[in-house]
Amino acid sequence: MEGKPLLQPEAERPVGLEAKDFNGTGDEVVSEPVLISDLRPLTSEQDMLRIALIGCGKIADQHVQAIRRIPDCIIVGLCDRELLMARQLAERFGINACFSDLHEMLEMTRPDVVHITTPPQSHYPLARECLQEGIHVYLEKPFTVTAEEAESLIQLADRKNVRITAGHNLQFTLEMLAMRRLVNEGFLGGKPIHVESYFSYDLGDRSYAGTFLGNQQHWVRQLPGQLLHNIISHGVARLAEFLDAEVADVIAIADQSPGLQGFGRNDVQDELRVLIRDNSGMTAFFCFSTQVRGLNQLRIYGPAGSITADITTGTVVRNPNRSYKSYLTYYQDFGMKELIERFYNSVRKGDPLPIPYREILLTARIMDKIFAQVYPAQGQRSEIRSRKSDVSGQRADVVRDSRIADLRSGVAV
């Protein structure tokens, strides 16, 4: 037996205690119910920004959740080489169109923006395909495998008059926004003198780390910087915002933690310290660790003061140690919704890009220099591969191998 629903559909529920009012004389006046749908501006589907995702692994969940909180957007398609991955994501979030082929998805859904959330080796060819079609691209971190690939994509975006951004969402947490505001207001008393970025990563139990450590063919092991390559761009990007475009010196020291030594793999580094100096003489320090837990900070020093933004504790502290608690929301997505929304506004309204291309390229160049020192042999292979890339706009030879069919289709993270 079917009963009445406990709640009326949202569009049918009246707002207010009663659908009646009183005029100035005290006489009761019955008025028409006010519907929630009457208060909300309606946007037709054709006026919405059309979004598609390539790669339906774990990080794609966070993208979908953030996109659904942004007004006037609709997710029109999901693509993954493993169609089952696209279907499971679609079922959980009520998305209709699933694909295992990139070209088919682009043709059928006609997206305005594509989010690429696949392993880094596929970022360049997938982003290039989308840019060539005149589609804006949100590219997860790390932006590309090499700085030369990053330059090629940005040049292509400029030629096609479309926009591309990097998934450096930690630049847009509430703490980082507060720090940036203090810097812009002149709290430091001049140009920054020194910046420090601290970033820790929990490898979890043996089953998690063993997934890639025990498999030489795992995509993490195929990156020039291996484990470091997939993680450190968040911490390096925070430094790039304040450094000059040309970095004079990068000194990198890496080691393996005792925890990782227990896996019997001595060819993977998970402790990293980097000292950087730009052409203006400003210095920066980056620390990455899997041994130190819960460390996610940026410290910036100027002539008249210093500021520390701590994303883990949700605080922004400015010298002399006066603490300003961040305005934390119930749902903290570590800046992803803020970054995505700003990127969409740059697409729709012509607003400035949330992350300038200068910072994206500088992050990639610093990472190139780091990995060339930490993994010299890997760095040489990347340099050879980069020389084969045609920055003038032709497809890089690096993607002309047996992986191209898989890369075009999207790969689960």
Image (cartoon, helix red, strand yellow):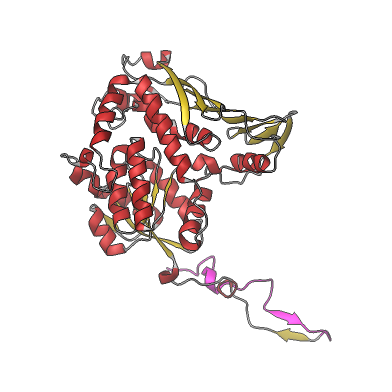
**Rendered residue at 38%/53% (across/down):** 158
Number of callouts: 0
Start-end of magenta stretch: 1-26
To which quarter of the image does residue 377 belong? top left
In the depicted structure, whether residue 48 falls above or below residue 27: above
Quarter of the picture holding the N terminus: bottom left
Point 48% across, 64% down: residue: 72
Measured as percent of width and height from the top left, residue 393 is found at: 28, 48
- Tell me if residue 122 is in the magenta stretch: no
Depth check: 91 or 238 in front? 238
Drawn side of residue 272 relative to residue 217, left or right: right
* Apparent side of residue 266 relative to residue 248 in the rendered image (left or right): left
- Asked if the stretch drawn in magenta spans residue 12, the answer is yes
168 w.r.t. 5: above or below = above
- Residue 30 visible somewhere in the drawing: yes
Which one is nearer the viewer's eye here, 154 or 413?
154
Residue 55 at what x, y percent from top left?
32, 46
Q: Picture quarter containing residue 112?
A: bottom left
Asked whether, in this view, residue 237 is left or right of residue 374, the answer is right
Tell whether 396 sits left or right of 25: left
Query: Where does residue 210 sit, x and y in percent of width and height?
Result: 32, 24
The residue located at (37%, 27%) in the rendering is: 227
Q: Position of residue 57 (x, y in %)?
A: 34, 43
Residue 57 seen: no
The outermost residue toward the front is 279
